[in-house]
Image (spheres, rainbow, N blue to C red):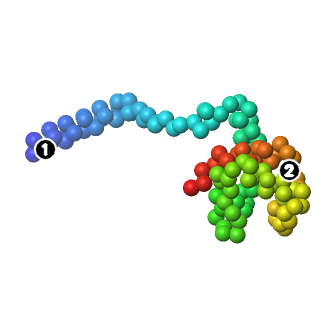
Amino acid sequence: MNQCIRLLIFVSIGLLAAACSEPAKVTETAKPDPWAALSEQERELLRHGEARARSCAACHGPQGISRNRMYPSIAGMSAEEMTAALLAYRSGDIVNPLMSPQARGLSDDDIAALAFYFTQQKAD
C-alpha cells in the first residue's frame, strides 16, 4: 500500500510538472507560395481574374474544375483557347444560352485576366 501511495504521488508530481511547463511549439511546414514566381503585373492580373471568375464558379467550379458533366472544366486551359472562346461568345460567333450573356459583359481586360487565372489553376 505504501508503494502505491508513493507511485501515485510520483505520477501526480510528474503530471503537475508537465502541466506547468510550456507547451511544445508546433512548427508549420512551409508551403510554397504559387504567387512568388509571378511579377507584380501578373499578380494583379491573377487578382483581377480571380475576382471575375466568381461568376464562372456556379457552372465551372470554384477553380474551374466542374462538378457537373454538362459544364466543361476550364482549369489549366490555355490562355489562347480561353481567350478565343470568350471572344467568340462575346461577339456572337458562338451562341450559347448561358455563355453568350456572360461573355457580353466582359471587357478585353476581363478576358485577359480570366484566361491568365484559369491557366494558373491545376486541372487535376
Residue 121 is left or right of residue 15, and the answer is right
**Residue beneath the point at 84% across and 53% down:** 87
Say the numbered circle drawn on residue 121: none
- x and y, in percent, of residue 17 in the image: 29, 32
Quarter where residue 37 is shown = top right
| Relative vertical location of residue 51 with respect to residue 13 in this rendering, above or below | below
**Residue beneath the point at 60% across and 50% down:** 122
**Residue beneath the point at 49% across and 35% down:** 30
Say the numbered circle drawn on residue 106: 2
Front residue of 11/77: it is 77
Q: Secondary structure at mark 1?
A: helix
Quarter where residue 34 is shown = top right
Front residue of 113/7: it is 113
- x and y, in percent, of residue 109 in the image: 83, 42
Q: Nearer the viewer, mark 1 or mark 2?
A: 2
| Relative vertical location of residue 57 with respect to residue 26 in this rendering, above or below | below
Q: CA distance from mark 1 to mark 2?
A: 78 Å
Q: Quadrant of the C terminus?
A: bottom right
**Counting other residues with Cα less than 10 Å from the Cα at mark 2, is it few (<14), some (14-19), or many (20 or more)?**
some
- x and y, in percent, of residue 6 in the image: 14, 38
Q: Quadrant of the N terminus?
A: top left
* Residue 63 seen in render: no
**Residue beneath the point at 71% across and 30% down:** 40
Say the numbered circle drawn on residue 4: 1
